[in-house]
Image: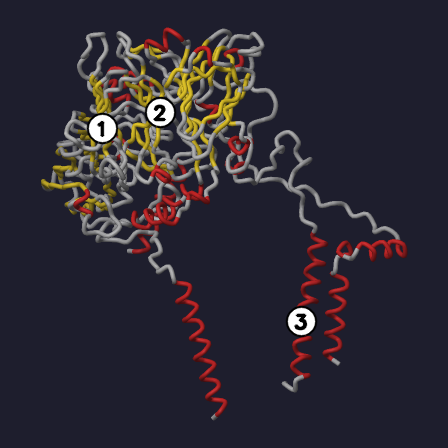
Amino acid sequence: MKLQRFFQLGLLLAVSSLFAAEPDPHAAHQHHQMEVDNVGVVMNENRDRLPRDCTSVSRDYDFTIHAGREYAADEPGMIFGLSQHEVRVQPCSRLTVRFINDDAVRHQWMVHGLPKYLYPAGMFHIEVAGGYEKTGTFIVPGEDRTYLLHCDLAQHMEKGMRGQLVVGTGSGDLWGVREISDGFFRSSYLPGQMYAWLALALASGVFLVTIALWESKKQ
Amino acid sequence: MKIKVLWALALCLVLVGFPTHWYPQAVRVQLTSWFGAADYRPLPMSMDPPSEPPEIFCPPDPEGWRDAQVIEGVDIEASAPCVADNPWAVAAFVRGTNNVTADTLMRSGLTTDAVEKGRDLDGDGDPDEIHIRLEVAELNGGSAIVQAPVTRYEIAPGIRPGLWVFTPKFVGMAVENFESQQARPDLRLPSPAIRVEQGDRVRITLENSHYMPHTLHLHGADHPFVDVTGEGNDGVPTTSEMPVMPGMARTYELEPRQDGTMYYHCHVQPHVHVMMGLQGLFVIEENRPDNWLQTMNIGSGQVRARSQASRQQYDREYDLHYADLDQQLSERIQQDNDPRLIARSMHREYDITDATQDYFTLNGKSFPYTFRESLVVGRDNERFKLRVVNGGAKGIALHTHGHKFTITHRDGMAVPEAARSMQDVAWLATAQRLDLELLLQNDGVHAYGPGIWPFHDHQNQGVTNDGIGPGGNISAIVYAEYMDTAGWPRTQGVSWDNYFTAAYYRKEVPVWRSYAPGLFDDAGVDWLLLVRLLMLALGAGMILALTWRGLRRHRGRP
């Protein structure tokens, strides 16, 4: 499992670096199916078009997912959170997500990696202004796979709003999903006097060996 | 016997390895008199610097954003440099994001409530109820998943300091697309210039989408200390109100009686938060009839939909936001992902009294990127208004080549006509604003004629990127006949290929490499001298060991 995560990360880094060479000032313009109103956006909603590897909708799910600071309140070092960071569904199932924003700022529930012939840019996306809610529906493919879901406001994913959508048995946990997997990088939480402790331990080791040798020589 | 051999070997190594040019001068002279001068030995060859292809100087404009156009009935002026603001966003800022068509709103990238415009209270043909919403975004921040900065934004080739900015409210992702970590083009430094009209009933809601507390302080703009409910309205946590915590929002209110070029910034730990980029121009325009204003100017620079007063007096108007950055501060958000560690590092371990600035920006970019978007482009006899703010920690000495300008306003207040003079260097203290009038009249005083005339901070660290020049806040006044059709100035002189590589600003490329290859390149290594020094070190080490052994034996130890 760990090895699989490593390769997934490697792929992500490789793809990121491929696209990071030359910024195109107009690259943000892509054509999505968007429903926009004063409250927010549902992008690429799909109630009835089946993925190519599905013959019918296998099951309907209804999820109510909250977003906001209170869902990170019990997690040290996190600022934002979701009421549910992992969503597990059957292949070819239809998900209706009621996304409720309990904060006063925008939040998003965004899934990546879906087939691009059904979902432009491979995304399904609900975005809601602070204090509002929106509901959207989409159908997942038949393949067992794990998809990234997150809020893409700057630093919201990094500070807690990162989850995974597991279809079927999935394809291995993603890194950095709260209560499921660790971050790939971890800050140092060692005490500030670490070097003093290490030096003391080192000196103790030298002292103990010296004493031991001294005693054995006397004998 | 064995020891004697080792002693002999060590002394030989030291004698042979000791460089002759380290001998005392008198010894060298004596040796020269005995043996003559040393044989000629060529100096090391020059080394080739790393080869890195330059970036495209002038990105293309496939959607015609640079052109003059009319959108939603808004006249949007042409923008001469390569990279122009999104004209759909300009139109939405003028009409109000609540008043434009769904198509314009989608092309603008803004939310419906980003800038709401309401009633015309004084009946003069323009809206006077303005509700602006600002979010807070982090650029080039840290992550627990990838090591490189996320939501990337380059101020110059390869330079990505960590930044915080106020931003308009956009729809969708913070990055260009899922495969990229590059920030969307309109999510950038500096925080947008904001424009309202004198007497407007203005509400600004700060939606704190960032992970640290922030506020909004309207520096120099007429605003009450408390709002009608008694809530603090000055943005200063120490004296007026609690900060806006992450995920929370607060609305600030003002009805400014005085027009002028003002400033806004976060006032939470301002020695850190302002320096991270939470600051922008705040312009209060004179009240005029039918005065539809471009409420936000993303990235500052040219104002493409101007006020009535500006149209009457000037041919163009530019917002020029100068700032500086300390790498030792900005890198701290990239070193950890835990907000507790970041807060400690930035607010307790960082000491601004020991700070030195490393990067110097004009409208959020440093040279050479300044030439993509912050050129002042004109023709003979055109008259421009430049609204300048210095948001940096140090003062700037703004100098224009080939032109003398007049300071018409200082900190938003008009300078009396009798006190005005023409200058080619203006000093701006931290947070100071100057309105400059620039007349392209070729009379030997106002201007010296057509050309490409740089303007920049004349304190010399300001024209570098972390000490490498040219860099910093250099831009130029360019006459139209010196611009090509793509929006790039037809410069004379050296090739700019090196300036558009990250290697140049990593200090890996000799500064004159492009036009004097080899002449001033890095010198190669003197391998012969290195071998001799290694022999010297080896011999010295042997002598130390042998001496140590001799001392021990002298004391009767084995």
Q: Are marks 1 and 2 in contact (CB under 8 Å)?
A: no
**Chain to which the residue tagged by mark 2 belongs:** B
Foreground: A117 or B476?
A: B476
Q: Position of residue B130 (x, y in %)?
A: 22, 20
Left or right for A121, reference B481: left
**Chain to which the residue tagged by mark 3 belongs:** B
Q: Mark 2 is on which residue type?
A: Leu
Please tell me if label 1 and label 3 are on a single chain: yes
Mark 3 lies on residue? B544
Mark 1 lies on residue? B252
* Earlier residue among tags 1 and 3: 1
What is the number of the mark on residue B281? 2
Left or right for A187, reference B53: left
Q: Position of residue A10 (x, y in %)?
A: 37, 47
* Earlier residue among tags 2 and 3: 2
Residue appearing at x 18%, y 35% in the figure:
A104
Please tell me if label 1 and label 2 are on a single chain: yes
Q: Is residue B202 above or below residue B43?
A: above
Q: Quadrant of residue B265?
A: top left
Residue appearing at x 47%, y 37% in the figure:
B158
Residue appearing at x 34%, y 18% in the figure:
B260
Q: Mark 1 is on which residue type?
A: Tyr
The secondary element bearing badge 2 is classed as strand
